[in-house]
Amino acid sequence: MYTIDINFLKDRQAAEGVGEAQPIADVNWLIGGGLVAFILLASTGLYYFVLSGQRNGLQARVQQLTNEEEALNRQLADLKAKEAEIENIDKQTQQLLALFVGDIPASAILQDLRERTPGNVKIKSFQQLDRKITLEGEVAASSPKDSAFDQINDFMLKLQESPFIAANGVELKSAKLNPPRKDVEVDIAQYRIELTLTPANALDLEAALQRVQSNGILARIATLRQKGVATSSQQEGEAKQ
């Protein structure tokens, strides 16, 4: 009799060995993933180098512009210094010219004030000390119904219009009514007004001096022009043209 020997253990081991083999699809997925990762890393590195190059270029451009700005600032500072020097020379020149021409004569100022003084205002005293002028006198009201103080106010407004008087250079120091009199129907007030002369010099007030016919100082200004010396009024006229 024959005996059939069947080895089930060997068959099972063979079957298990076949099941442990790596699938082909999984291997391809790993290879593809590695390629994608490599491409991403390579792209990132290339992008980094491109950005680094652009950054270096921008930094160089910024440095160039900074250097140009510093050079322009130095040139601008030099121009401002030269302009200040020229302005200082012009100022000194005008001061010397003003000394040659002289101050505004008191006669010119007094003539201008007379022209601005109404008929009902009297100037009894005219005193000048440096750039201050003190006027004293009396004012009569224009009618019995009017106030002499209103006439003083109107007189001060006329004085303020004078080119020889500084801005806000008219100040009322005192004003009082005279005692009433039977033979006088209107109010009469005594006043004391202080004036401050303009800081402008005679060269700047040539037109006003011509109006009051201050011939002496005008002759000195004309002498400067004949010698070719430009006054401040001439320079302003040339600038406007």
Image (spheres, helix red, strand yellow):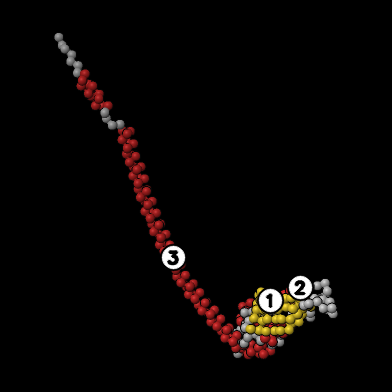
Query: At label 1, which amino acid type do we have?
Result: Lys
Q: Secondary structure at mark 3?
A: helix
Residue on which the image places disc 2: 150
Q: Position of residue 118 (x, y in %)?
A: 77, 79
- The residue shown at (23%, 24%) is 14
Query: Which residue is at a point 76% across and 82% down the rendered structure image?
Result: 122
Front label number (1 vs 3)? 1
Cα–Cα span, label 2 and label 3: 67 Å
Q: Residue at x 34, y 43 (%)?
A: 37
In the rendered view of the protein, which quadrant contains the N terminus?
top left
- Per the image, label 1 sits on a secondary structure element best described as strand
Vertical arrangement, residue 69 with respect to residue 82, above or below: above
Above-or-below relation of 70 to 166: above
Q: Secondary structure at mark 2?
A: helix
Q: Which of the two discs, 2 and 3, labels the residue nearer the N terminus?
A: 3
Which residue, given by chain and number where applicable, does mark 3 sit on? 66
Which amino acid does the dot numbered 2 rest on?
A: Asp
Amino acid on which disc 3 is placed? Thr
- Counting residues from the start of the chain, the first of labels 1 and 3 encountered is 3
The image quarter in which residue 218 lies: bottom right
Question: According to the image, label 1 marks what residue?
Answer: 173
Residue 202: tell me if it is visible.
no
How far is the residue under mark 1 from the one under mark 2?
15 Å
